[in-house]
Image: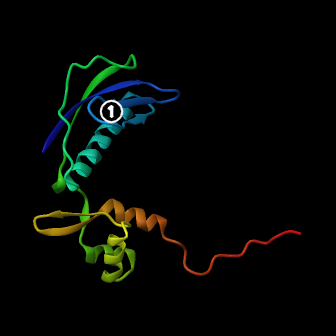
Amino acid sequence: MLHVYEFEVFEGERLLIAAPYDMEGGTQGADFKEVCEMAADWLQIEMEHRAMHGLPFPEATFDNEPRHGGRNIVVAVNAGKETVMRVTAAEAARRLRVTRGRVSQMITAGLLETFELDGRTWVTEHSVEARLADQPRPGRPRKEKVEA
């Protein structure tokens, strides 16, 4: 589904800020090209999140008056459940080096994000990557030496 929204791009303390008019949030970039790319990424993620969780898509408005003295850009993305990077629970288990049962426990505990598409449950690629990044190292933690 195509989503088109207007953002205001304005100068922050050290970076350019892109803020949508019709939603909370926004993003930033070092220069105009980067902030525009980041706005597209932000909108893609926001629309996929709303699609996965059955949240409404805000009504888009245009020709908004800049609130922070910036300039307006229009950002369009094709986003929905079908565009979410995803894996099966079995693939998530393989990549995380755990059992399918452990993946089920992680889903129940909210450690992995899932959604339904075409009658199947999928695990988001992002949540698997986040778990991989947060995995503790094998072995016991070292005790810190206490100086007297």
Residue 73, x across and y down, in percent: 27, 25
- Circle 1 is placed at which residue position? 36
* Residue drawn at point x = 45 percent, y = 32 percent: 30
Residue 31, x across and y down, in percent: 42, 29
Residue 146, x across and y down, in percent: 81, 70
* Residue drawn at point x = 21 percent, y = 55 percent: 52
In the figure, residue 20 lies in which quadrant?
top left
Give, as a three-letter code, the residue at label 1: Cys
93 lies above or below 36: below
The reply, left or right, for residue 13 in relation to residue 70 is right
In the figure, residue 47 lies in which quadrant?
top left
Indicate how the structure is coloured in the image: rainbow
Circle 1 — which element?
Answer: helix
Quarter of the C terminus within the rendering: bottom right
Mark 1, other Cα within 10 Å: few <14 / some 14–19 / many ≥20: many
* Residue drawn at point x = 19 percent, y = 26 percent: 61
The reply, left or right, for residue 82 in relation to residue 29 is left
Quarter of the N terminus within the rendering: top left
Q: Nearer the viewer, residue 107 or 78?
A: 107
90 lies above or below 33: below
62 lies above or below 46: above
Residue 66, x across and y down, in percent: 33, 18
